[in-house]
Image: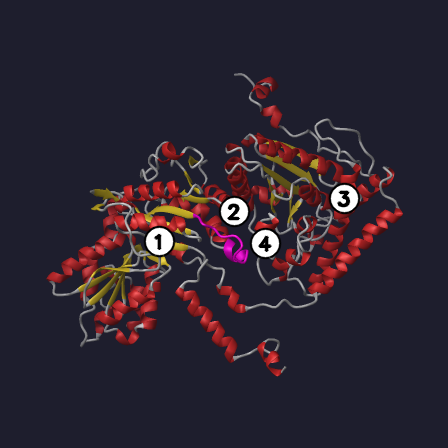
Amino acid sequence: MSTTFAKALNTALRDAMSEDERVLVLGEDVGRLGGVFRVTDGLMDQFGEKRCFDTPLAEAGIVGFAVGLAMSGMRPVVEMQFDAFAYPAFEQITSHVAKLRNRTRGAVGMPIVVRVPFAGGIGGVEHHSDSSEAYYAHTPGLKVVTPATVEDAYSLLREAIADPDPVVFMEPKRLYWSSADVELPAAAPPFGQAVVRRRGNDVTLVAYGPTVPVAIEAAEAAREEGWDVEVVDLRTVVPFDDETVLASVRRTGRCVVLQEAQGFAGVGAEIAARVQERAFHSLHAPVLRVSGFDIPYPAPKLEHVHLPDVDRVLDAVARLQWDDEPDTRWTRGLDGHGLTGAGLGGVA
Amino acid sequence: MTTTSESDLSTRGATRLLPSTDPVRLLDEQGRRTGDDDRYPAPSDTDLLEMYRRMVVGRRFDVQATALTKQGRLAVYPSARGQEACQVSAVMAVRDDDWVFPTYRESMALVARGIDPVQVLTLLRGDWHCGYDPVATRTAPQCTPLATQTVHAAGLAYGESLQGRDTVAVAFIGDGATSEGDFHEAVNFAAVFKAPVVFLVQNNRYAISVPLAKQTAAPSLAYKGVGYGVESEQVDGNDPVAMLAVMRRAVEHARSGHGPFLVEAHTYRMDAHTNADDPTRYRDAAEVEAWAGRDPLTRLEAYLRSAGVLDDAGAEAVRAQAESFAADLRTRMNTDPDLDPLELFEHVYATPTTQLLEQREQVRAEMEAEPDAEGTAEEDHR
């Protein structure tokens, strides 16, 4: 039976609420409307206004309120309507949600899930398509999760709700209406375990969230060029799975990191650094990043220029193929090809 | 065009929410009872005697903590001297199972609540962020970011009511922090969800150096509740009798299902913002002097003596108790805490990530390679 990504999330919430009375859903328009992406559809009807409720329109208030709810023993799941709307809540998330366990020496945990519909590709106007995962991933105490498949939408959200620690759950908006033949409840590997979505021997392509389908498509296309590309889906950015990524790179000897977010100081930079620190002697070429440009998310008619696509990934893969001629190629017109230059500076 | 008459406001319930025109006061500056206020029955003399005891201990604690800062035992200390009536009344107005949400200036309130003073000072001493168990003490960590804890209080109070408990939360906040967005979101959320929260605004006239007039144009901070549909009151924060009476009514209002209540206590911070601050740069000696004449402890003591519930021997007994409290605190603060650097990695997540375990191992190796003089090496010599 075909199930959409959004429906899998909805079912995860429903199942978690059925199993545990402490689970609450709150946010803007999550009640009667069922959320602007319908992820909370029907929850208020089924569980009542005490379990699924609309709040005043104030993001810091929503997250701060959830902190208090968690202190009283509840397990709140909050919805931030869109990525860039979550910024007013940033202080609550970084100063309190992330730190309360630490500040209280373990006495007060924060079992809160902050759901953030994120990233672009849906033709949204400004402030509706930000990739904000690096802000959260840079904050100790938070787990940062980005499902890319229908199974993961269900299983990772269930795990997020059950987790004793706060989880920023980043839902790629452009995958909401993707679907798969999946029977729910679906089981999948736990947090901190990346998954190889496609086996390959020549290049490791690391992706997460919205770029996983792009990576798989690129890997299929690369086969026609004779390149055997392995795709690793991180699933959780924090905890980060060094083991799976490094095992793959040590085998393939080449690595491209793919992210939709702007490149500078992003998650891809962290991954590239970790790979080069830990698998340097296995590498036949520098780790490359393919990312969005270092610009505010563009207007809808130009987002196709910004978003890393299959061609841009293939271009990066092509640049990793010259084992015997390490000459000027690495400095040639890279920015013009949408590869982030920052990661290549040291090679020039 | 019509103007809104008072009766229109009344129909819509607005007048019910309005604070008194002047701050509620039940003791004058000489400590004489000013008469009764039907809305705020005066507490019993027994309760006031207990309040006096906690205020004397609180002030002695505050003076001691300030001294410990000068001795380098505390990294910083924000004094609350002069605000004893606000701090003590708030914790006396609640039950042990109610929650309080303090700021960094509420050390005295926490001591009055019965939390071990060494634990209260742990944050300021610099060995861990929150020195006490918030769950066991029903006291949130002292909050350094401004106003953020007020939203937590609203959420906790609502969460408690959802679970059928009649717990009340008291959120402390200063005058400056009422300018922060989180305060407004907290009052609004609490009102919409009828959460049993009391917001206690201690208006001590200055946010570090910025005076109230530069903070707000409102005639009183108490009026800030009205716009959100929250019953509000202003009170003489240096009048212990009025403070306890108003806080008790506020807590009762919240507990009985009427939603939040906002109290503005007019008071004054007698000392600097913290030891790092020079208050002579921004306020007149004459102003400080005038407020010294409204000292809450002197007022309460005068009242209790005139009521015949306190005499020289009684006052001396309380003072002796405060001295012994301070002496005990000094002794215990004179020893350096035993800290384990490896614990740094234990409370980031419920279970450390592999990366944290690697970093923990790095620190462990560093400690082994270079045992410091006071730590392992010394033990090795024994």
Give residue B101's position: percent from left, percent from top: 59, 46
Three-letter residue code for mark 4: Asp
Give SS at disc 3: helix
Please tell me how many numbered marks the rendered image carries: 4
- Which numbered circle lies on residue A145? 1
Q: How far apart are marks 1 and 4 (CA)?
A: 30 Å
Q: Are marks 1 and 4 in contact (CB under 8 Å)?
A: no
Q: Earlier in the sequence, mark 2 or mark 1?
A: 2
Check the image and name the residue furthest to the bottom. B381
Q: Residue at x 54, y 46 (%)?
A: B148
Q: Mark 3 points at which residue?
A: B50
Q: Nearer the viewer, residue B67 or A128?
A: B67
| Label of residue B133 in the image | 4
Residue at 55% x, 50% y is B145
**Residue A71: which disc?**
2
- The residues bearing labels 2 and 4 have C-alpha atoms spaced at a distance of 12 Å
